């Protein structure tokens, strides 16, 4: 099978093209650095299927970043039949810099001029034919987003793949061409493949090449002596880069004719003036985030209803009609999109659950079988299913922010605000990705060059609440809001999300002062152009999420729920018993005391363990926390008089609060504990793989300690306000201690002194 590789700058539209070619649903984000590893798929519309390999986005083939090395080695070693170099036509000069390097490799190659729709819209004129003649490679205009020109591109690549191509360079005729030619001949004589490419890289002093070809490097060093007095003082790397840019602007860029534009700011610039404002940038981000949480987790459109007086009772007296209307409209006014989908889903799960229960009853199933199906299987499963639509609404909003280009700005403003605390904007990109799922977010940290930064980022990614933890927040906040008037569920969820982000920033700043001291890596990111999010893209992304959730619900979560049900309904002697005699009770009661500082330990007399068990099942998958609540609610809720047998959803959490006697403060502490503690196994394993060997145990200790201490503080502070000054004083002392220690004013080390032998 023929193999085509896609190569191009970050954010040039490579993933979009890859998806269009292969029908895959890889994540497209309007910011650089989303693809960090190569990805494979198949294009089937040519006479024979072609393998498509998507390489990470790069600006150059130098050896400085993992992406560059992956891409370069792939083209050199795997020898694709054709390289499709994607070029962002709105940014021709910069993108062609990479083109001039790939050209030097002996590989068939075509240039895909992407984003041609944007060029046309701006009124600029791009002469592809002219560029093709100048560059000496086939050039095809495409719009990956609109799927235009793609078939032609593939035919062109197919034709190019039929012949061999020898590398060419734009450095011909420059002061360096002599040495490049000499080195090339020497390398060729030794039978080295791609001699031109290696010759140029050697001339640049590329660190990977120098090691492999010491003799030829000697030739370059000799030659360098003639250049001691040159403006570049013999810095051949700079000379090569300079020569490339000069050639590009003198020869290739003439293919573009820019439309006459008045010197006014573009729309994008004007938006950026506001959205990335020095002072208002972060408050605007918080308002945007709150709007999202309000629309997702709020019950009704609070502000619109108040403003336009939508809040009215609309009871018609017809029960079915009223129930239907209640999905979209309550006495408080029009419901939020999140509430509407939640209500609809609740309606569906109630029908199914009721049907199953009635079916079992009339079939005369044994009590244990009824319990197993209704409580063990259905309660946990439906609990998770009922949240899926709402979480999808949340993802829809977040995807819109990402695809529009706004999230890239958020990384930028966060970088500006928190750089002095030791955080870089590059590290914020994986953190923000953590809102979706920690696993891809942790993989994304691969591109952080600084090891300490990578470790710190991996540790705090789980603090950015992922989609699996969202149901915990939604259910807990919903339950608290329904018990206490004056508390908004959406505001509470928003507060917890922001709290998680704040904790990430605080903990990175703390590590920067203690175990991970060092300089912040520079952050250079081009802000991508704003554009309207693509409907198809959004739907693909949501579909991917939905599949993932459903799979998880019917496998891991289902299995865990069944296990929890058995353990909570059977005794050690394997007889069906009430929950207070169950296996789970015994195990839970044994460890319950540990949670006393967080408010769900000995305070809850016999039921603190419910929360311990929920947190432990959360290690398997975070959705399990809520599924466990729902499975246990019937057994425990039965102990209170107000228990309603069919209680499900948020009502089950309310019942659990009443039956166990947990306070809202402790329940919030419990939520915070789950947000900050060891993430699910999948995420933990990924973090382990992405961080240096042998250090993972410290990361686990970090998660356990941070979550335990923070949750305890949350519980204490919320329960007893007067403790605030004491806690503040202790925290201030800790901060002062470390700051002084770093300035050398205090000498104190946690490490044991090593023996002299070890030092030798
Ligand atoms: P990658 O980083 O190179 O993989 O780039 P992506 O595929 O993630 O695309 C970056 C952004 O450019 C996304 O927001 C895409 O929707 C957008 N994009 C990609 N191709 C086109 C195109 O042909 N026209 C327009 N207008 N936008 C595009």
Image (cartoon, rainbow, N blue to C red):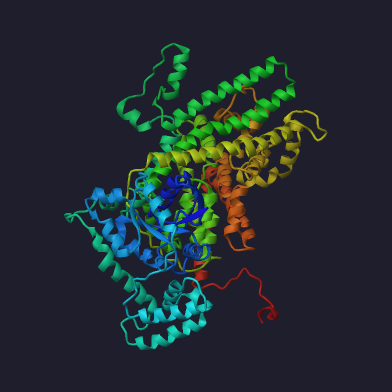
Residue 384 % position (x, y): 57, 34
The residue at the point 37 percent across, 42 percent down is 534
Residue placed farthest to the right in the image?
573
- Viewer-proximal residue among 589 and 374: 374
Examine the rendering and report whether any part of residue 19 can be seen.
yes
Residue 434 shows in the view: no
Q: Is residue 574 left or right of residue 361?
A: right
* The quadrant where residue 370 appears: top right
> Looking at this view, is 642 or 215 the one in front?
215
Relative height, residue 379 to residue 321 (above, below)? below
- Is residue 663 left or right of 224 when viewed as pictured? right
- Residue 651 location in percent, x, y? 56, 28
Indicate the quadrant containing the C terminus: top left, top right, bottom left or bottom right. Answer: bottom right
- Position of 143 compared to 350: left or right? left
Q: How many marks?
A: 0
Front one among 24 and 714: 24
Q: Is residue 140 above or below residue 328?
A: below
Residue furthest to the top in view is 317
Give residue 71's position: percent from left, percent from top: 48, 62
Q: Picture coordinates of residue 325 (x, y %)?
A: 43, 19
Residue 752 in the image: above or below residue 33: below
């Amino acid at each position: 099978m023929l193999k085509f590789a896609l190569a191009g700058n970050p954010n040039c539209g490579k993933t979009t093209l890859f998806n269009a070619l292969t029908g895959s649903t890889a994540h497209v984000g309007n910011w650089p650095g989303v693809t960090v590893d190569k990805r494979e798929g198949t294009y089937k519309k040519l006479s024979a299927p072609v393998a498509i390999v998507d390489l990470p986005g790069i600006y150059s083939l130098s050896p400085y970043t993992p992406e560059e090395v992956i891409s370069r080695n792939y083209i050199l070693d795997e020898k694709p039949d054709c390289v499709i170099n994607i070029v962002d036509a709105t940014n021709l000069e910069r993108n062609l810099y990479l083109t001039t390097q790939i050209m030097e490799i002996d590989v068939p190659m075509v240039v895909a001029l992407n984003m041609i729709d944007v060029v046309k819209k701006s009124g600029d004129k791009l002469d592809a034919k002219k560029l093709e003649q100048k560059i000496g490679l086939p050039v095809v205009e495409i719009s990956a987003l609109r799927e235009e020109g793609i078939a032609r591109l593939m035919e062109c690549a197919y034709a190019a793949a039929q012949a061999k191509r020898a590398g060419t360079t734009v450095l011909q005729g420059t002061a360096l061409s002599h040495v490049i030619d000499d080195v090339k001949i020497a390398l060729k004589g030794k039978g080295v493949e791609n001699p031109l490419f290696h010759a140029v890289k050697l001339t640049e002093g590329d660190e990977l090449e120098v090691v492999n070809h010491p003799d030829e490097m000697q030739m370059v060093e000799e030659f360098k002596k003639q250049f001691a007095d040159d403006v570049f003082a013999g810095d051949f790397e700079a000379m090569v880069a300079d020569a490339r840019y000069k050639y590009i602007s003198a020869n290739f860029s003439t293919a573009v004719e820019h439309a006459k534009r008045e010197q006014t700011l573009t729309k994008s610039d004007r938006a950026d003036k506001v959205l990335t404002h020095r002072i208002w940038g972060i408050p605007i981000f918080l308002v945007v985030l709150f709007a999202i949480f309000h629309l997702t987790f709020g019950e009704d459109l609070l502000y619109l209803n108040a403003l336009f007086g939508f809040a009215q009772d609309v009871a018609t007296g017809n029960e079915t009609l009223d129930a239907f209307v209640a999905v979209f409209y309550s006495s408080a006014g029009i419901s939020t999109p999140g509430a509407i989908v939640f209500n609809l889903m609740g309606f569906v799960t109630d029908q199914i659950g009721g049907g199953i229960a009635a079916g079992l009853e009339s079939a005369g199933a044994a009590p244990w079988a009824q319990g197993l199906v209704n409580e063990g299987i259905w309660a946990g499963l439906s609990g998770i299913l009922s949240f899926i639509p709402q979480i999808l609404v949340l993802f829809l909003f977040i995807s819109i922010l990402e695809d529009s280009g706004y999230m890239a700005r958020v990384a930028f403003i966060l970088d500006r605000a928190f750089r002095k605390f030791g955080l870089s904007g590059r590290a914020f990109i994986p953190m923000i990705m953590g809102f979706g799922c920690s696993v891809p977010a942790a993989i994304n940290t691969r591109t952080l060059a600084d090891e300490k930064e990578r470790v710190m980022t991996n540790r705090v990614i789980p603090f950015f609440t992922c989609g699996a933890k969202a149901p915990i927040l939604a259910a807990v906040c919903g339950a608290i809001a329904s018990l206490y008037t004056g508390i908004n569920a959406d505001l509470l969820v928003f507060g917890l999300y922001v709290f998680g982000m704040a904790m990430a920033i605080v903990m990175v700043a703390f590590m920067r002062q203690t175990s991970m001291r060092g300089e912040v890596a520079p952050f250079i990111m081009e802000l991508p152009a704003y554009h309207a999010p693509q409907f198809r893209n959004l739907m693909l992304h949501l579909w991917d999420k939905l599949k993932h959730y459903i799979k998880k619900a019917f496998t891991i979560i289902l299995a865990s729920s069944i296990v929890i049900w058995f353990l909570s309904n059977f005794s050690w002697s394997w007889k069906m018993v009430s929950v207070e005699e169950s296996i789970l009770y015994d195990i839970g009661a044994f460890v319950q005391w540990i949670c006393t500082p967080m408010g769900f330990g000995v305070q809850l007399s016999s039921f603190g363990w419910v929360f311990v068990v929920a947190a432990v099942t959360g290690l398997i998958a975070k959705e399990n926390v809520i599924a466990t609540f729902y499975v246990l609610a019937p057994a425990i809720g039965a102990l209170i008089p107000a228990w309603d047998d069919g209680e499900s959803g948020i009502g089950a959490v309310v019942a659990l609060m009443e039956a166990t006697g947990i306070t809202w403060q402790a329940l919030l502490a419990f939520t915070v504990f789950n947000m900050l503690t060891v993430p699910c196994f999948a995420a933990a394993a990924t973090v382990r793989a992405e961080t240096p060997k042998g250090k993972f145990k410290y990361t686990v200790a970090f998660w356990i300690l941070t979550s335990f201490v923070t949750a305890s503080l949350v519980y204490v502070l919320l329960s007893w306000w007067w403790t605030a000054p004491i806690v503040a004083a202790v925290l201030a002392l800790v901060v002062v201690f470390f700051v002084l220690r770093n300035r050398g004013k205090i000498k104190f080390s946690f490490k044991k002194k090593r023996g002299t032998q070890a030092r030798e």
